[in-house]
Amino acid sequence: MPALEIKALHQYFEQGTVNENHALQGIDLTLEPGEFLTIIGGNGAGKSTLLNSIAGSLPVTHGQIKIADHDVTYQTVAKRAKLISRVFQDPKSGTAPLLTVEENLSLALRRGAWRNFWRPGVKKSDRALFKEKLASLNLGLEDRLSAEIGLLSGGQRQAITLLMATLQMPELLLLDEHTAALDPQTSATVMQLTDQLVRAQSITTLMITHNMQDAIKYGTRLIMLDHGRIVVDVGGAEKQGLTVPDLMRMFKEQSGSELTDDAVLLS
Ligand SMILES: Nc1ncnc2c1ncn2[C@@H]1O[C@H](COP(=O)(O)OP(=O)(O)OP(=O)(O)O)[C@@H](O)[C@H]1O
């Protein structure tokens, strides 16, 4: 059973108006369990629209989306959140700043099931688990369990957000340029942690990145989007041997134009 099955997905914005935008133009994409897909493409190619469609934050215009055999096409974000973890670009968006590191992790362990208390409780047995998980990140965070998250750096917060997203293994992990707001060195550290966490549990993952080197280096499969279509799809040994010039050439051959994205070209 595939972890993700997208069939003939179309997304229109402002359909039927002069501003109509056919942002996704028939996406077919199947991911087997444990596949780690990197997604690149120029500005406005449809990368975020694809992730938003999977997460449910955009209603689907046409097509079907199944996650682990559940048809989620018309499910609300909240309903499908049981299947999906998502990490965004802004390190502030994934954690509650006034809660401590262990309280944030405790929330993630219960997948947000905390409702009635002003602070989530932390069980002793959970604390041992959090210490162990944090130690595996090698950032010294295992000694900061009772620190407020808001006092940590962006990289530390993003590392904890990743840990929270993978604490209870999701069917799908969506990474939406999750290292883009970090400085290059921190970004590289968080990217390595991502790889470590994803591979340790074989989590089916989709990662948008503007960094072509990362898109090649990490993951098991790579797609390039252009004007709402998948124009390049490489995996296995072919992906391992890729270089940035290879990708630029493949993009040009398939799309008929040069890849124009300042962030991609400068990375
Ligand atoms: N909410 C919206 N309303 C109208 N148009 C939108 C909306 N969201 C995205 N679009 C348009 O859909 C197209 C795809 O946008 P999307 O954000 O998915 O691209 P992207 O590949 O993520 O680009 P970038 O790398 O610049 O973030 C673009 O033309 C964009 O302007």
Image (cartoon, rainbow, N blue to C red):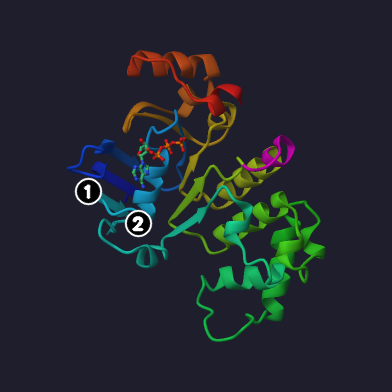
Q: Is residue 187 above or below residue 138?
A: above
Instruction: Give, as a single range, the part of the protein colored magenta.
Output: 181-187
Q: Is residue 243 visible?
A: no
The answer to whether residue 11 of the structure is visible from this angle is yes
Among the 4 quarters of the image, the one containing residue 73: bottom left
- At label 1, the amino acid type is Thr
Q: Residues within 10 Å of mark 1 (few under 14, many from 20)?
A: some
Residue depicted at x 60% and y 23%:
266
Residue at position x 58%, y 58% from top?
Answer: 93
Residue at x 58% of width, y 30% of height: 217
Q: Is residue 97 above or below residue 50?
A: below
Q: Secondary structure at mark 1?
A: loop
Task: State the image coordinates of residue 22 (x, y, percent, origin top left).
Answer: 26, 37
Residue indicated by mark 2: 56
Q: Which residue is mark 1?
A: 61
Asked if residue 73 lies left or right of residue 91, the reply is left
Residue 50 is labelled as none
Judge by depth and name the residue closer to the eye, 62 or 214: 62
**Ligand 1 image position (quadrant):** top left
Q: Image check: 54 left or right of 92?
A: left
**Quadrant containing the C terminus in the rendered view:** top right
Residue 183 is inside the magenta segment: yes
Q: Of all residues shown, which one is farthest toward the left?
A: 16
